[in-house]
Image (cartoon, rainbow, N blue to C red):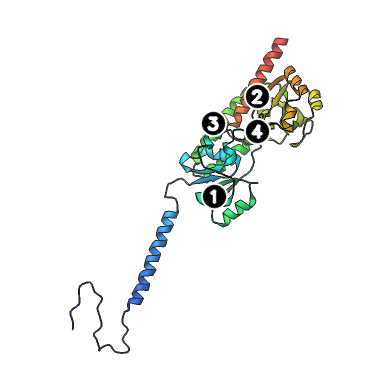
Amino acid sequence: MPMLEPSSRPRARAGNASRGERRPTDRHAYRRSVRIAASVVAAMLVVFAAPARGALPRVASINLCTDQLVLRLADPSQIVTLSWLSADPEESLLADEAARYPLNYGTAEELLRYDPDVVVAGAFTGAYTRSLLRSLGYTVVDVMPELTVDDIESNLRVVARAIGRAERGEALIAEMRERIRHLERTKPAEPVAAVVVRPGGFTADAGSLAHTLMTLAGLRNVPAEQGLDRWGSLSVETLLRTPAELLIVTPYRTDEPSLANAVLAHPALRAVATRKTAIEIPGAYFGCGLPDSLDAVEIMRRANERLGAANGDAL
């Protein structure tokens, strides 16, 4: 019997193997080794593809309002991309913060490059994009528009949980509730009549976020009382007849000539503003519901207090 060579496979004796004897072959061993290697590689891919245990998910947003929710809730290291509108100060309250991140235009092709773990989108944002992302295996969180304070709290909680920041969400909600309690305690006994005038003469209806914030500020939304809906517009003649003590103007891209802005520049409207208390609030405060929306309430409350003081002096 020949000696075995070190580290070699045992070899059959030449010329003595019977026809019925099955010998191990290199081909069988190769296949077995390939199967083992493939299993190991697959396991490694699963490990490296998934976020490490305890790591926060990578987050993308494709909607102006969800951009700002993500900015308020996420750890900066989580954010991989936000929509382009978030960096526009005419649209976003958090434009400076948003400008630090890569921006997208809401297409699925763009998001594939960032490979997020969670995509946060508006419930009415690009239905095709959201469907395609889901079909590719991405987690997509749909967020409804915020029309009330309860909506803001709900969306904070939904997004916070989806991106692994539940504690941050609850902390923001607690801060909001404390500010609201203070606003409720200090609300004027008699609501002040007010009207919101947007570019084009559009106003705020009873089901809007602007109406919610006006009510919290201790104001009466006169156009809503008159039955105007969200698409209702106020002619200059109607504004002249409106018995409002406070005029709230929401300027938008005033450096760009437009027919919509021409309404705000009408001499009659300016004359109304000189006779009443008038303030400007950026439209971004009324566009998306955020903890920052309460800043608009405080602006209106201060105007309300100035109006009350002026009426007291007149007496």
- Front tag of 1 and 3: 1
Give me the C-alpha separation between circle 1 and circle 3: 33 Å
Return the x and y of residue 18 as percentages of the image width and height: 29, 89
* First of labels 1, 2 by sequence position: 1
Task: Please name the residue shown 63% across and 21% down the image.
Answer: 302
* Residue 218 visible in rendering: yes
Query: What residue did someone put label 2 on?
Result: 300
Determine whether 147 is above or below 40 in the image. above
SS of the residue under disc 3: helix
Give me the C-alpha separation between circle 4 and circle 2: 13 Å
* First of labels 3, 2 by sequence position: 3
Q: Amino acid at mark 1?
A: Leu
Specify the quadrant of the image occupied by residue 295.
top right
Query: What residue did someone put label 1 on?
Result: 111
Give me the C-alpha separation between circle 3 and circle 4: 20 Å
Few, some or many C-alpha atoms within 10 Å of disc 2 (few <14, some 14-19, many ≥20)? many
SS of the residue under disc 1: helix
Q: Amino acid at mark 2?
A: Met
- Front tag of 3 and 4: 4
- Front tag of 4 and 1: 1
